[in-house]
Amino acid sequence: MQNDKLKFKKDFKKRLYTFTLKLIEFLDKLPNDNVSRRIGDQLLRSGTSIIGNYIEGQAASSKRDFANYFNTSLKSANESKLWLALLRDSGRAKAEDVYWFLSELDEIAKIFGSSILTLKGKKSF
């Protein structure tokens, strides 16, 4: 059981890291217009915040502190979905390029949400 938890944590951290690297690559390919740069900056902040807060949460000093970092990661994942949708719907990014990120963020958000519920003593379904 403990080995499963450690493996999941390691795999999830790697998944977040891979997501972040792909996001940086995606952002580098956006058009060089004013709106794309502004939205791209917002997406870079929220997208990299996901793993940053996850890492900080691993070193949390209390269960409450840990939950707060996870909550911030969840909020950052949800915010990132907005910026990606705006890039897609404004025609600044192709729908097929955005699809993977939105799908991955849905999965990441579910994992954080489930973890937060577990920390609060509520079962997740």
Image (cartoon, rainbow, N blue to C red):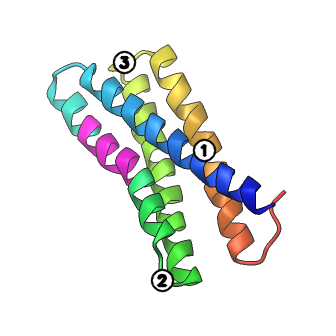
Q: Nearer the viewer, mark 3 or mark 2?
A: 2
Query: Disc 1 marks which amino acid?
Result: Asp
Query: Does the magenta run of residues contain 44?
Result: yes
Q: Residue furthest front?
A: 3
* Residue drawn at point x = 53 percent, y = 84 percent: 62
The N terminus sits in image quarter: bottom right
**From mark 2 to mark 1, how far is it between C-alphas?**
23 Å
> Which of the two marks, 1 or 3, is nearer to us in this view?
1
CB within 8 Å, label 1 to label 3: no
- Amino acid carrying label 3: it is Gly
Extent of the magenta region:
40-49
Residue at 51%, 49% in the rendered image: 78
The label number, if any, that marks residue 11 in the structure image: 1
Quadrant of image for the C terminus: bottom right
Residue with the mark numbered 2 = 61
What is the quadrant of residue 115 in the picture?
Answer: bottom right
Tell me which numbered mark, 2 or 1, is placed earlier along the sequence.
Answer: 1
Please provide percent x and percent y for residue 61.
48, 83
- In the picture of the structure, the residue carrying the numbered disc 3 is 91
Is residue 111 shown to the viewer in this render? no
Q: With respect to residue 113, does 97 lie above or below?
A: above
